């Protein structure tokens, strides 16, 4: 199996953190020297290990934000 390479080109922010120091982050990540994509996944404190995650193109991220912003108030997470 070929080695997967990655480079975090821009750290956009931490979404949450576990008690063991892993953080769920939104970053721009270049996988295998390709164009960077928006990427959401858990990272170890030194960013050498990661969990499975999801990578989105700019168009997909725009659609995700649009869908989130257009949800009905009854679909809100607030109680």
Image (tube, rainbow, N blue to C red):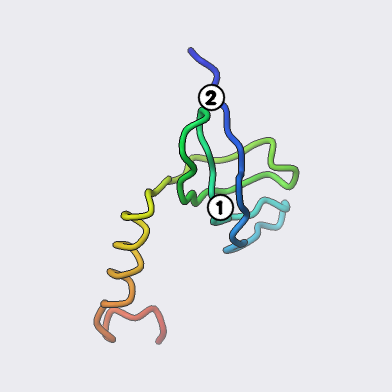
Residue at the image point whose x is 32% and y is 54% from the top: 60
Extreme-front residue of the structure: 35
The front one of 57 and 76 is 57
Q: Is residue 19 above or below residue 34?
A: below
Q: Position of residue 51 (x, y in %)?
A: 55, 40
Number of numbered labels in the structure image: 2
Residue at the image point whose x is 34% and y is 81% from the top: 76
Q: Position of residue 58 (x, y in %)?
A: 38, 54
Say which label, 2 or 1, has the lower sequence index: 2
Q: Which residue carries the number 1 mark?
A: 27
Q: Which residue carries the number 2 mark?
A: 4
Residue at the image point whose x is 52% and y is 30% from the top: 33
Q: Position of residue 3 (x, y in %)?
A: 55, 18
Residue at the image point whose x is 30% and y is 70% from the top: 66
Helix, strand or loop for disc 1? strand
Badge 1 density bin: few <14, some 14–19, many ≥20, Cα 10 Å: many
Give the side of residue 20 with respect to residue 36, left or right.
right
């Amino acid at each position: 199996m070929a080695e997967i390479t990655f480079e975090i080109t821009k750290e956009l922010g931490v979404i949450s953190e576990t008690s063991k120091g892993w953080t769920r982050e939104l970053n721009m990540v270049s996988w295998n020297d390709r164009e960077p994509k928006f990427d959401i996944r858990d990272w170890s404190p030194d960013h050498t290990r990661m969990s499975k995650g999801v990578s989105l193109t700019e168009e997909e991220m725009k659609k995700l934000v649009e869908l989130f912003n257009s949800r009905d108030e009854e679909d809100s997470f607030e109680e």
